[in-house]
Image (spheres, helix red, strand yellow):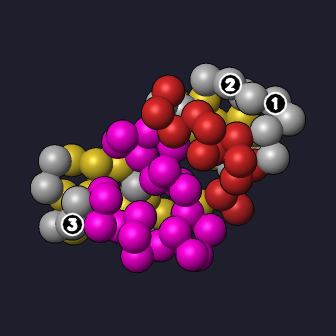
Amino acid sequence: MESLKDYVKIVTRNGHVVTRYQLGDMILLLKDCGFIRIHKSFIVNAAFITAYNARDIEIGKISLPIGRTFKELVEKHLGGSDL
């Protein structure tokens, strides 16, 4: 999911949808479903992460940055071995 100010772009295997939510509201709804916030602009489903390092995560061929503020949270959630 990507933040677009007062909207969120939800990306799926079949395309994307834009909905009128803020990213902060979405993480509150989805944090217990395996989603993690990796950046001020991105939430991802941890089950689809294919690779990660100290700076970014990969979901298939898509690379997304890990924000400094969220690095510790991502490390805790993913085990921290490569962060």
Which span of residues is magenta-colored?
23-44
**In the shown orientation, is residue 47 left or right of residue 20?**
right
Residue 47 found in image quarter? bottom right
Instruction: Give how far across and how far down residue 12 sits, in percent.
Output: 48, 63
* Amino acid at pointer 1: Asp
Residue pointed to by mark 3: 21
Q: CA distance from mark 3 to mark 2?
A: 29 Å
Q: Earlier in the sequence, mark 1 or mark 2?
A: 2
Categorize mark 2 by other alpha carbons within 10 Å: few (<14), some (14-19), many (20+): some
Q: Earlier in the sequence, mark 1 or mark 3?
A: 3
**In the shown orientation, is residue 2 left or right of residue 54?**
left
Instruction: Give how far across and how far down residue 46 sits, in percent.
Output: 65, 57
Residue pointed to by mark 1: 82
Disc 2, SS: loop
Q: Residue at x 51, y 39 (%)?
A: 70
**In the shown orientation, is residue 78 left or right of residue 9?**
right
Disc 3, SS: loop
Disc 1, SS: loop
Q: Is residue 24 highlighted in magenta?
A: yes
Categorize mark 1 by other alpha carbons within 10 Å: few (<14), some (14-19), many (20+): few
Residue pointed to by mark 2: 54
Residue 18 visible in the displayed image? no
Q: Tag on residue 12?
A: none
